[in-house]
Image: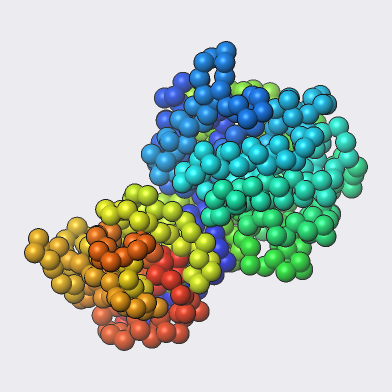
């Protein structure tokens, strides 16, 4: 029976590894603990590290990023965290808030915003410049709809939007391809003045013009003591409350933006814990593990707008004592003992596996990149984003399950030669150079908006790995670069399926050779 391919996720930043977590690596005094924590994250197949970068730690004086007392750069600790994450193939989402004392007259609360949004914009610009090519996702502020995140004053959606606008503008001036996440809003039923429901707050954000100043809406998804299936209700705090957040986005014409989850979880404090300390309610620890995984899997199946889910939290460095309820959200104990939640997430994440029948973006976890690949805004790509590299020797690896594979690309005067291997060997459909390497020359004197390159046919229906490596460009190329556009995988009994699928797909008219179009995996079995 024919297996229909999964539909392509056309909303940017949604065809991704959904598994991420929050980390507190800035508190670790010993580098080996940072490395071990991130190694355990990678072993659990997580793809994302949500990490705080407190402004007050980095810019000690206006425009100065050096600690005179310690005689070293204030970036140093955070550089080590970022470099370790990259070494473990983990992507960093950077939270930027907590202004330094010099930026405010009133310093009673370290969470309060700066007196001048321009100072925040200056720091965001410096941050993006410093981590250009290493951090691509920025969270601008945190939970401004509750006390004390907006200081000793009533919450102010318009004030936050001014801050967001400045941070967004300055980030994009430095790197147009960086992705800006709005501040996650705390789930609350309160109506002000210091705590305001996230639904009311978001409506006001849109009313005062927030729409043009973020790329991804960051939301919180705590379940409290209710199951992931508990229906949304404006008078109830639960996981599916985010569906009402999504409705606000749609009403404001923002349906083409994704929703990512900043904090997701259920608290598993002991039964003996005092009720007045259970701010997030409680469930048993096995229930916690089951519901977190269920929430992610259900959401990915039901919501085409859902992207990354950052579980609260992975592991802490000892700053949260067992007497606090939030101690019991952890995936891993301070001493590195995995909890049931860690094991459940690891099992679920491992099932992501190779690309099976369906259509996928360049960001799908079945694709991995080696080298200096960057994300580039590409309006003609199906998800509006592509991966590009200009470095000879960089490569992309695609894990798939099928019997044929075709590379969908764009030929042109700046396109290079690519070298291709299948399961570590030469392929059976490409020519070979004098060194015996399978290759495809993508050079063309004129741009060809779409070219289908057959990589291999007649394969056994099992797991395979294709590796595409950037070769030398034509000597006449002015701006040599490789932007991969997609893949088609099918079974042997459908010889024309690749052309048919690509011609009829919603991303068929992609005007760039970019791994930002999609790849298709198709299977037909009797």
In percent of the image, x 86 and y 32: which residue is there?
A: 152
- 146 or 226: which is nearer to us? 146
The quadrant of the rendering that contains the C terminus is bottom left
> Outermost residue toward the top?
69
The quadrant of the rendering that contains the N terminus is bottom left
Residue 494 in the image: state x and y as whole percent.
Answer: 30, 84
Residue 390 in the image: state x and y as whole percent.
Answer: 35, 56
Query: Is 389 left or right of 416, judged from the image as shown?
Result: right
In percent of the image, x 82 and y 46: which residue is there?
A: 159
Q: Is residue 127 above or below residue 109?
A: below
- Looking at the picture, the colour scheme in use is rainbow
Q: Quadrant of residue 203?
A: bottom right
**How many marks overall?**
0
The answer to whether residue 375 shows anywhere in this view is yes
The answer to whether residue 40 shows anywhere in this view is no
Residue 87 in the image: state x and y as whole percent.
Answer: 38, 39
Query: Is 248 left or right of 90, judged from the image as shown?
Result: right
In percent of the image, x 28 and y 85: which residue is there?
A: 495
Residue 224 in the image: state x and y as whole percent.
Answer: 71, 45
Q: Quadrant of residue 192?
A: top right
């Amino acid at each position: 029976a024919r297996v229909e391919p999964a539909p392509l996720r056309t909303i940017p930043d949604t065809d991704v590894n959904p598994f991420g977590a929050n980390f507190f690596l800035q508190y670790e005094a010993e580098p080996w603990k940072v490395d071990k924590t991130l190694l355990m994250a990678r072993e659990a197949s997580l793809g994302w590290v949500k990490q705080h970068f407190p402004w007050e730690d980095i810019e000690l004086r206006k425009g100065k990023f050096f600690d005179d007392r310690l005689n070293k750069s204030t970036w140093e600790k955070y550089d080590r965290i970022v470099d370790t994450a990259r070494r473990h193939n983990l992507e960093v989402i950077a939270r930027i808030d907590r202004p330094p004392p010099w930026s405010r007259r009133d310093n009673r609360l370290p969470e309060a915003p700066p007196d001048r949004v321009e100072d925040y914009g200056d720091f965001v610009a410096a941050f993006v410049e410093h981590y250009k090519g290493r951090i691509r996702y920025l969270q601008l502020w945190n939970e401004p709809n509750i006390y004390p995140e907006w200081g000793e004053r009533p919450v102010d959606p318009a004030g936050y939007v001014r801050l967001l606008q400045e941070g967004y503008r300055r980030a994009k001036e430095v790197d147009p391809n960086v992705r800006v996440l709005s501040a996650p809003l705390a789930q609350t039923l309160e109506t002000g003045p210091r705590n305001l429901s996230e639904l009311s707050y978001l409506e006001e954000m849109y009313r005062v013009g927030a729409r043009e100043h973020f790329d991804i809406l960051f939301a919180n998804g705590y379940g409290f003591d209710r199951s992931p299936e508990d229906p949304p209700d404006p008078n109830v705090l639960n996981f599916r409350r985010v569906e009402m957040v999504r409705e606000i986005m749609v009403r404001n014409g923002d349906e083409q933006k994704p929703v990512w989850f900043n904090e997701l979880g259920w608290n598993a404090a002991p039964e003996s814990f005092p009720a007045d300390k259970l701010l997030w309610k409680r469930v048993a620890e096995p229930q916690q593990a089951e519901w977190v995984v269920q929430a992610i899997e259900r959401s990915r199946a039901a919501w085409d707008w859902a992207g990354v889910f950052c579980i609260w939290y992975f592991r802490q460095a000892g700053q949260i004592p067992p007497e606090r309820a939030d101690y019991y959200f952890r995936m891993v104990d301070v001493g590195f003992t995995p909890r049931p939640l860690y094991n459940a997430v690891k099992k679920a994440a491992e099932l992501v596996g190779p690309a099976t029948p369906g259509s996928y973006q360049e960001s799908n976890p079945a694709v991995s990149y080696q080298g200096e690949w960057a994300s580039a805004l590409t309006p003609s790509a199906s998800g509006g984003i592509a991966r590009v590299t200009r470095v000879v020797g960089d490569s992309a690896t695609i894990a798939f399950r099928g019997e044929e594979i075709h590379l969908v690309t764009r030929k042109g005067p700046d396109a290079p030669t690519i070298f291709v291997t299948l399961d570590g060997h030469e392929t059976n459909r490409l020519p070979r150079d004098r060194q015996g390497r399978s290759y495809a020359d993508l050079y063309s004197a004129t741009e060809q908006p779409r070219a289908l390159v057959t990589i291999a046919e007649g394969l056994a229906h099992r797991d395979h790995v294709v590796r595409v490596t950037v070769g030398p460009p034509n000597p006449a190329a002015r701006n040599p670069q490789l932007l991969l556009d997609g893949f088609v995988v099918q079974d042997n009994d459908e010889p024309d399926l690749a052309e048919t699928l690509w011609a009829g797909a919603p991303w068929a008219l992609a005007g760039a050779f970019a791994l930002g179009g999609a790849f298709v995996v198709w299977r037909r079995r009797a």
